[in-house]
Amino acid sequence: MSTRESATAPQDGDGRVALVTGAGRGLGACIAARLYDRGYRVALTDLDTKAVEQAAADLDPTGRNAVGLGLDVR
């Protein structure tokens, strides 16, 4: 959390959907988690299908607001 934000920052997702590439690990996974925490429904994508499915399940075990998909964007 940055110093400009408080722990009670408003949820700004407002039902929006975000598509995050490279979300199986690292920066992409962090971005997906941040968006999810802000109220977005998130589609996580990565070449590594197992990793991205696990990352999505870690965010939302129900699969209602986060889904992991194997995807090659080349």
Image (spheres, rainbow, N blue to C red):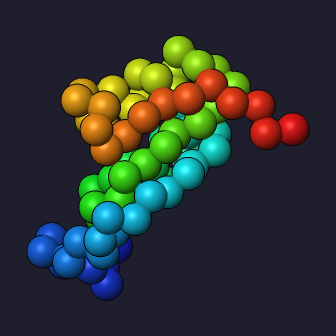
Residue 69 x, y percent position in the rendering = 56, 29
| Left or right: 55, with 12 as reference point | right
Extreme residue toward the left, this view: 8
The residue lying at 49 percent from left, 43 percent from top is 43
- Left/right placement of residue 26 relative to residue 71 reads left
Kindly tell me whether residue 40 is visible in this rendering.
yes
Closest to the observer, 8 or 16 = 16
Q: Position of residue 29 (x, y in %)?
A: 49, 42
**Taking 74 as reference, is 34 above or below it?**
below
Q: Percent x, y for residue 4? A: 31, 84
**Residue in view at x 33 percent, y 27 percent:** 57
Image coordinates of residue 39 in percent, x first then y, are: 28, 61
> What residue sits 69% from the left and 30% below the top?
71
Q: Farthest residue toward the top?
A: 50
Q: Can the viewer see residue 34 in this picture?
A: no
Q: How many numbered marks, from 0 up?
A: 0
Image quadrant of residue 60?
top left
Which of these two is toward me, 40 or 28? 40
Residue at figure coordinates x 87%, y 38% from the top left:
74
Q: Is residue 21 above or below residue 40?
A: above
| Camera-side residue of 63 and 27 | 63
- Relative height, residue 6 to residue 59 (above, below): below
The quadrant of the image that shows the N terminus is: bottom left
Describe residue 16's horizontal placement relative to residue 4 as left or right. Answer: right
Q: Residue furthest right?
A: 74
Quarter of the image holding residue 22?
top right
